[in-house]
Image (tube, rainbow, N blue to C red):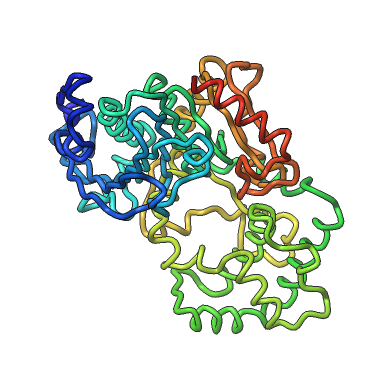
Amino acid sequence: MLFIGAFLFSCSDTKSVSLEQQLRQIPNVSVKKIKGDVTYNEYYELYFTQPLDHGNPKAGTFKQRVLLGSRALEKPMVVELQGYNIWTEREGELSKLLDANQLTIEHRFFKDSKPDSLNWKYLNIKQAAADQHIVIQALKKIYKGKWLTTGISKGGQTTIYHRYFYPNDVDVSVPYVAPMNLAREDKRINQHLETVEDKATRDKIRQFQLRCFQQKNHLIPLVKAYAEEHNLHFSMAMDKLLDLLILEYPFAFWQWGTTAATAIPSAKATTEEMVRHLAKVADIKFFSEEGIEPLKPFFYQALTEIGIYEYDIKPFEKYLKAYEKNLTFDHTFPHTKLPAFSVESMKKVNHWLQTDADKMLFIYGEYDPWSATSVVLNGNKKCKKYINPKGSHRTRINSFPDSTKNEIIETLKKWMK
C-alpha cells in the first residue's frame, strides 16, 4: 500500500478531469500515451515503481510495465495478468466479448519488469500478487465498474494466485488452461500422456520416439547442424539435447494440437525429415540458452513453488542407460543450487479453490497435458469449470461448441452485473 499513496478525487472531479490527468495523479507511476490497440478510445503505457519485497521497503524497487486500453470509465475492466512478459497490445477475448476496458500487467522479473539484479528470493506468488494488487487498487479509483481478472497458462495460474491473496480485488476471474500442480514434478501429466485420445495416435508417437532413439547416432550431427543453422546455443551436450527433444515430443504434440497424426514421420522417413519434424514440434529453441534465458523466472518458480512435469525414461530405458532417474528441468539452472521445492503454498491455494473461491470460471482443453493438473473444484459450486472436447492449450471461450460458449458468456454477464 505504501506505493499506492492516497490520490483522492470526488465523483465530480473524476468526470471533469481527463483520464490522462487522473493517471498522472497516481504516485510512483510514469504515464505515456501510445497508439496501442486502436479499438480502444485511449491507450497508455504505465510503469509502476514497485517494492522488491512488499514486507520490506528497504529491499529496493523495480519498475513494472502495465498497459491500459480505455473505452469508457463506466464500462467494466478486464485485467490480463501475464505469467510472463506482455506479448501484445491487442485486446483479449474477454475485453472484446464484454466490451470492456483492458489493463495488462507484466509479471515481475520478466522482460521490461526486471529489477537491476535478479535476486530470486523475491520471486514468489505472494510478492507477484502484491504487485498486481497495487496496480488494481490504483486504477479502481478511476474505473468504478465491475472488475474481472484473467490470464492464459501461467497467466491463468497468476490469476488464481492473485485471487487467493486478494479475493476482493475483483468481482470475477477467468483463468484459461491453468495447471494446479501439487508436486515439483507432477506425475499426473505423464499419466495423461499415456491415456490421451486414441491408442493409434499414441502408438504412432511412441514408434516415432523409438525410431529416433534407434537412429540417435545418425541424428546427433543433424541436430547439431540444425542448431548452428538457427544460431542456437546449448549448455548441454548434443546427445542429451536429442534425448530431451525426443522425450518432450508427446507433451508438445498434445499441448498445441497443431500437428496431425498423419504428419508424424513414418518408418520410411529420412533422418533429415525426422530431425526437422522433431525440432519443430518439440521446439528445439525451448532447450537452448536463447530460449531458456527469457523464461528463467518461470523455471525458477516451477522448480521451487508452482510445479512442472518430468520426462519418464522407463519406456526407453534401453536407450537411456546414462540416466538413473527421470529427467527434470534442472538443466535450466546448470550452475545454480535452487531452494528445495515447497508444496505448501499450492496446497493452501488448492484448498481455497475447493472451499472459498467464488465466481471463478476455469477454461481447459481436453487433450492439453496441462489439463491433467487442472483445478479440481471438489464440489465448490460457487465456481465453474469447462473442458473443451479435444481442445488443446490454445483453447479459448470461442473454441467451444456454440451452446457451451453461449452458456459461458451468459454466466460471465450474470456474474458481472
* Residue 340 sits above or below residue 36 on the image: above
Vertical position of residue 196 compared to residue 284: above or below = above
Q: Is residue 281 rendered to the left or right of residue 87?
A: right
**Residue 262: quarter of image:** bottom right
Q: Looking at the picture, does residue 333 appear above or below residue 281?
A: above
Q: Quadrant of the N terminus?
A: top left
**Most distant residue in the front direction:** 16
Q: Residue at x 43, y 61 (%)?
A: 292
Depth order, front residue of 13/58: 13
Image location of residue 188, percent across then percent down:
67, 40
Pick out the residue farthest to the right. Answer: 200
Q: Position of residue 85 (x, y in %)?
A: 38, 51
Q: Is residue 362 left or right of residue 313?
A: left
Q: Residue at x 26, y 45 (%)?
A: 64
Which percent across, then down, holds residue 371?
Answer: 65, 40
Q: Position of residue 417 (x, y in %)?
A: 49, 19
For image coordinates 29% across by 35% down, the residue present is: 131
Q: Residue at x 24, y 31 (%)?
A: 54
How many marks on residues? 0
* Quarter-of-image position of residue 240: bottom right
Residue nearest the viewer, comparing 290 with 77: 77
